[in-house]
Image: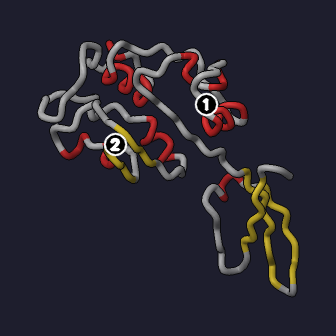
Amino acid sequence: MPGVRRCVVDDYHLHLPFCDLLKEDKRTVAGLNTEVCAVQTPPNVVFIFADDFGYRDVGFHGSTVIRTPTLDRLAYNGVRLDNYYVQPTCTPTRSQLLSGRYQIHTGLQHSIIWPCQPNSLPKEIPTLANKLHDAGYATHMVGKWHIGYYEEPLIPTRRGFDSFLAT
């Protein structure tokens, strides 16, 4: 079956991540009591979030001037979120995407948060990275954060990302 990974759980109780989602087919192989498990492989999730990106700046939206074959391939073979309404600056938009809440509900509706500025996405609000991490995903971020980093508990690796490479 496409998209299904096969794992074997034997007397040594070897488990793959997400084995709680499996369907069991008990068999005996070479005298061992073995369970053959079909595990649905979770999809890869990649968000590409760019500032100052025009609608027709990519091939999959009709650009004939800027060639974007890799982005086009990802868009045609994945899920596109074409109706996400952004704000005119990066902090409100990032806070919405990462928290799932309108920026008016996070207090980040006005402007960019600079490194020394004592403001942030509230610590009690989980991020998309927290939720994905809780579901067993490895989470990585490349780029700018801009939702608060004046204290260590606010940096990306404390907000659900396993790693962060700043630009």
Give the percent coordinates (x, y) of residue 124. 30, 33
Q: Residue at x 61, y 35 (%)?
A: 71
Q: Residue at x 24, y 22 (%)?
A: 112
Give the percent coordinates (x, y) of residue 135. 54, 46
Scheme of colours in the image: secondary structure
Please name the amino acid that badge 1 sits on: Arg
- SS at badge 2: loop
- SS at badge 1: loop
Please name the amino acid that badge 2 sits on: Arg
Which residue does the numbered mark 2 point to in the structure image? 159
Left or right, 37 with reference to 139:
right
Quadrant of the rendered image containing residue 151: top left
Identify whether 2 is placed above or below 10: above
Q: Depth check: give the residue in front, 102 or 81.
A: 81
Q: Depth check: give the residue in front, 35 or 90.
A: 90
Which residue does the numbered mark 1 point to in the structure image? 67
C-alpha gap between disc 2 and disc 1: 34 Å
Identify whether 114 is placed above or below 40: above
Numbered tag placed on residue 29 in the rendering: none
Left or right, 29 with reference to 154:
right
Q: Dot 2: few (<14), some (14–19), or many (≥20) neighbours within 10 Å?
A: some
**Nearer the camera: disc 2 or disc 1:** 1
